[in-house]
Amino acid sequence: MDVLVYLIPISLILGGLGLGAFVWTLKSRQYEDPEGDSRRILSDEYDDHPKTD
Amino acid sequence: MAATAQPAACPACAVAPAAAEIAGRQGAVGGEQVLLSLPEIHCAACISGVERSLSAMPGVRRARVNLTLKRATVDVDPGIDAAGLARELKAQGWAAHELDTATLAGTQGDRAGRDLLMRLGVAGFAMMNVMLLSVAIWSGAEAATRDMFHWISAAIALPAIAFSAQPFFRHAWTAVRAGRLNMDVPISLAILLAAGLSIWETAHSGAHAYFDAALSLTFFLLAGRYLDHRTRSVARSAAQELAALEVPRALRISGTGEAMVPVAELAVGDVVRVLPGQRVPVDGVVESGASEIDRSLLTGESLPVQAAKGGEVNAGEVNLTGVLTVRVTAAAVDSTLHRLADLVAVAESTRNRYTSLADRAARIYAPAVHLLALGAFVAWLVVSGGDVRLSLNIAVAVLIITCPCALGLAVPAVTTAASGRLFKRGLLIKSATALERLAEVDTVVFDKTGTLTAGMPELENLDAFDAADLSLALALAEGSAHPLSVSLANAAKAAGIAPAKVALLHEVPGYGVAAEWRGQRVRLGRAAWVGKEPAGQTTTYLQIGERVQIFRFADRLREGAAEAVAALKAQGMDMVLLSGDAEAPVADLAGRLGIGRYESGILPHEKAARVEALAAEGRRVLMVGDGLNDTGAMAAAHASISPASALEATRVVSDIVLLGGSLAPLGETLETARSATRRIRENFGIAAAYNAVAIPVALLGFATPLAAALAMSASSICVSLNALRLR
């Protein structure tokens, strides 16, 4: 049963990471325009950080 | 552990940065934000094309397209005109309309939606982690190991529940304080009791803890809530966008010159200029100028009315031919249009009186569940001879297992599926109970002008004229923007006629167009102007010297009107045509479409009275209309639909807005509504069947946390899948 000492923290950390990632996607407004985002990957322009050359 | 609990510990953390971000977005130093509606964009090339064009325009700092909302957000330097950007974009090939930022301010970033999503996410991840631990317990963890797993579960579940289940607690508390029972009361009770009992059991090394059940309850119910919220917020933002398309501005004339000002800033006594083609922004009296006014949206009359100095005009009417200067007699908030706010409020309260299927279910369900749990507690107390712990355990198991997981998903899952389907076909469902009410409809009442007809006249007797007359008429018609002239010109051009050469072409506002042709005076305009008695029909007169020709017009049918009427007839609906227009055009239209019952010359309040009379006969009336004169009837009807071209006040009253120009989806809409209601009933059936099996098991004390978890998930998934079957 000693393995639990590692496994439980690992499961909790993984869950926490998942939740953290979800919170990040939510806060960076990644659910605002699902349709547009799925199309934007086809565009080769950098839209969030315009080129400043 | 800390990582899981931290976001849950502070709900404000979840909202604060988002709020800061919104503030940051609008506070682009010294700049302004402009919103443009882009109805036709659909692909990656459109997105980058529009963004590139906008960014290249002078004064634009940043442009971002949202394809889901079909909208562009543009940061511009102060003083840049949004209408100008839209015009330039249109010139480059993308249809664009300016949106009123003030009207849309409330929808910027759906905060309530993100809040629900955050709670849903926290509940979901906590549920997964606790389930993982529970699997170990179900597969036989004993004694100290089991207790430790229970404690860890408690440490995850309690903060997660405290954060995620707040919406239920809040609603339940409001209801209890008001002395009512709603669905949230048994939900909150089940969640709280499950968590409390589990803590107590864990502290006493008990075998059963319901942390996973409490969390999955929260998760599934939040999913239902979120679906519900999303459906409504999509409808709301689309409705608001329709409203925002009409930017309320007016051209005010003051001592210092002319200026575009928001309509809200106009005061009584101000003078505004109304250009041809514009909607009159306020109620007022004409100071100078002469023109014709299209009042069809207010009264249903299809013939334009003359307006000259001293005449009254109302907000919502459309100025057709000449420039009018209008002195404001009622400020925006007191105008005819705005007085409708009262009417709308009345309509809303009528709607709220309708009890949806979900409410009816909740009304039976909530007390039944509480009585059942109480009964189980008392009965087991007697049977077991005073074992409080056992009795409480069973009572809580009954509460958890009967918790309306499936019931909570039964309605939102179906309405989401149905609204999504209808939205794709160009229908906007605004009211939560619209589908249920629509499914009960057996009589359809139509308005004529602007609803069944496009509000556009069409030349009827083109063949009656020779080419020379037509080419002369075309030359004159091209000198005016009046709808009859435009229609005449289009018809003549379609017949391959070229305009004749005329001299001294000029428009006489309110009368028609005059010119000189081969030394003769020629005129195209109203009857009195050419010395004739006006006919009952929509007509315009061509005078060549002393000879007068009559052009007759009929209002063109709206696209899809014939199909819609045919489809409704096939479904066995009774149809009635009620119009404020004159007898002849109404009878003609009823005959063309095959609508048996019609009445003409109906005043607005009579329309509402007719609908109420039908309702008194026990009929469920669907009112389809677009004008101000229809709003009363729409409010009185069981359900209502308006086209997107309707006045905003009318759209606000209606349950459903047709976004496309065509009426054709009307028949399908009723079918979809009926099948959606059928699915909702089936879902209630599934939930009832599930309870019929689960309740006896729980009452007899055989329910374990594993059984509860399995039963709950299974019924929720069944209900969701059933909703997806919707056709």
Image (cartoon, coloured by chain):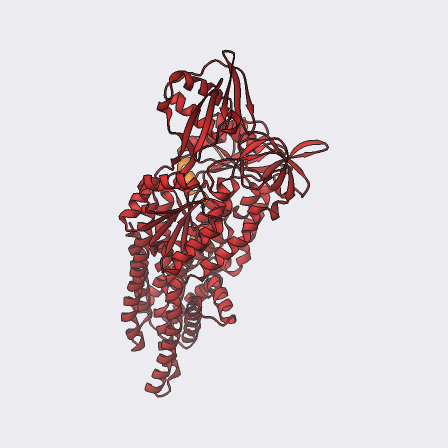
Q: Nearer the viewer, residue B103 or B705?
A: B103
In front: B270, or B78? B270
Chain seen in orange: A
Q: Chain B's colour?
A: red
The residue furthest bottom is B385
Q: Residue at x 33, y 72 (%)?
A: B142
Q: Position of residue B6 (x, y in %)?
A: 50, 58
In the image, residue B509 lies at what x, y percent?
Answer: 56, 27
Residue shown at 44%/48% (left/top)? B235
Residue at the farthest right position: B255
- Any part of residue B666 in sight: yes
Residue B212 lies in quadrant:
bottom left
> Which x, y percent locates residue B476?
49, 20
* Quarter of the image where one finds residue B494: top left
Extreme residue in the top direction:
B518
Rendered view: B554 above or below B378: above
Residue B660, visible in the rendered structure: no
The residue depicted at 48 percent of the width and 38 percent of the height is: B71
Image height of B382 relative to B27, above or below: below
Left or right? Give the position of B413 relative to B602. Answer: left
Count the marks: 0
- Of residue B394 and residue B86, the one placed in the foreground of this image is B86
- Left or right? Give the position of B12 relative to B390: right
Seen in the image, is B661 located left or right of residue B524? left
Q: Position of residue B31 (x, y in %)?
A: 62, 36
Q: Which of B543 and B438 lies nearest the eye of the viewer?
A: B543
